């Protein structure tokens, strides 16, 4: 096989940094399925790992990128044949196994998901880990009893990838969505995705009582910290919070009162470790009832592999909205 370009991350004397290199297939982690990469994407986790801002990568050197979609060029596993369109997200891909920022990827067959009917390679990477995580949030909230008549659903970190897709999906399903953001310039963007109301993060009075006025039937929280603590105090009785992120802090200072007096539930969302049967089910739903209506608005930037390194700092500083797509060979 021809040599190909990849973005590889090194730990050199304690300094984490990545660079473009030319690799061959044997440089990659082992796997039964080799694909010609069409697209990858950039998630907050990718930016943490590629810059060393977070301890994401488990070994070095490592081809980064936790998402990939492409077409099979060879497979020793009979479930996949040359030309099949497939994707991988999570499962340790791009963390402990060489990831998607390369023109070719080698994948464990058990991690591979066939491309859902009705979606293109570009579509599934426009969604990527962020979109899949949003779908997992909605699924778990539904399983725990969330219905539109239960009251509005609040989405924090609303302009990010998970938040943007969650707003789109929830609005499509008939929920009244309140988006929380500190970016006044993005109100029109959020309303265009289906948010009914915008709550300015900087104007929230978090209060100090164990229970505050109940406001929300459910929540998707990308922030953590004080924001998540406030949500526990303001969820309606028997409501649920899907906890996704920790951009605002990893500690949670609350009391047991909302749990034992209002019966609320705090649902941990770990998309990387999602069991494969549920993973495949959710990708099928992302092609049908959970398919966002405004994916073209959510993808706000498309970059090449050469342009990729310039994206990470922008994402870490919260200066980007929606999703960033990485185009390699395309569809």
Image: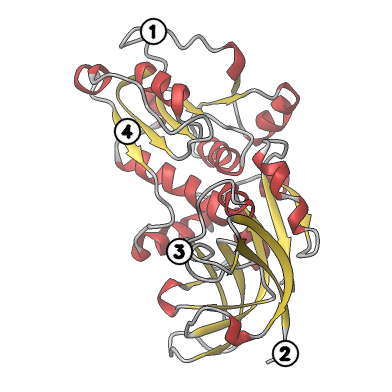
Residue named by callout 3: 92
Choose top left, top right, bottom left or bottom right for residue 13: bottom right
Q: Is residue 152 visible?
A: no
- Give the Cα distance between marks 2 and 4: 49 Å
Quadrant where the N terminus is found in the figure: bottom right
Residue at point 46% right, 34% down? 220
Choose top left, top right, bottom left or bottom right for residue 106: bottom right
**Mark 2 in CB contact with mark 4 (< 8 angstroms):** no
- Give the Cα distance between marks 3 and 2: 26 Å
Residue named by callout 1: 208
Position above or below: 256 against 174: above
**Mark 3 in CB contact with mark 2 (< 8 angstroms):** no
Residue at point 57% right, 32% down? 157
Label 4 Cα neighbours within 10 Å, binned few <14 / some 14-19 / many ≥20: some
Helix, strand or loop at mark 1:
loop
Please give the count of numbered marks on the rendered protein: 4
Considering only order in the chain, which callout, 1 or 4, is on the residue closer to the N terminus?
1
Label 1 Cα neighbours within 10 Å, binned few <14 / some 14-19 / many ≥20: few
Asked if residue 54 lies left or right of residue 142, the reply is right
Residue named by callout 2: 2
Q: Where does residue 119 sit, x and y in percent of width and height?
A: 60, 64
Helix, strand or loop at mark 3:
loop
Position above or below: 285 against 163: below
Helix, strand or loop at mark 2:
loop
Choose top left, top right, bottom left or bottom right for residue 287: bottom right
């Amino acid at each position: 096989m021809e040599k190909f370009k990849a973005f590889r991350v090194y730990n050199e004397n304690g300094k984490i940094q990545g660079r473009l290199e030319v690799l061959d297939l044997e440089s990659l982690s082992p796997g039964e399925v080799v694909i010609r990469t069409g697209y990858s994407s950039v998630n907050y986790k990718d930016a943490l790992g590629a810059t060393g801002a977070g301890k994401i990568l488990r070994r070095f050197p490592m081809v980064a990128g936790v998402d990939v979609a492409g077409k099979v060029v060879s497979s020793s596993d009979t479930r996949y044949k040359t030309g099949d369109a497939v994707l991988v997200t999570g499962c340790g891909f791009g963390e402990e196994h060489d990831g998607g920022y390369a023109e070719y990827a080698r994948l464990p067959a058990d991690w591979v998901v066939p491309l859902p009917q009705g979606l293109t390679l570009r579509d599934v990477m426009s969604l990527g880990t962020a979109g899949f995580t949003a779908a997992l949030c909605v699924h778990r909230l539904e399983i725990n009893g969330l219905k539109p008549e239960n009251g509005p659903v609040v989405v924090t970190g609303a302009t990010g990838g998970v938040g943007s897709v969650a707003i789109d999906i929830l609005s499509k399903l008939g929920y009244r969505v309140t988006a929380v953001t500190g970016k006044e310039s993005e109100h029109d963007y959020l309303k265009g995705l289906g948010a009914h109301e915008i709550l300015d993060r900087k104007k929230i009075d978090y209060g100090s009582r164990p229970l505050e006025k109940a406001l929300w039937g459910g929540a998707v929280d990308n922030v953590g910290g004080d924001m998540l603590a406030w949500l526990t105090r303001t969820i309606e009785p028997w409501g649920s919070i899907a906890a996704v992120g920790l951009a605002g802090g990893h500690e949670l200072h609350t009391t047991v009162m909302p749990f034992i007096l209002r019966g609320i539930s705090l649902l941990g969302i770990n998309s990387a470790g999602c069991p494969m049967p549920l993973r495949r089910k959710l990708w099928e739903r992302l092609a049908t009832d959970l398919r966002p209506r405004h994916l073209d608005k959510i993808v706000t930037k498309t970059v090449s592999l050469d342009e990729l390194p310039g994206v990470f700092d922008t994402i870490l500083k919260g200066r980007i909205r929606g999703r960033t797509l990485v185009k390699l060979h395309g569809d």
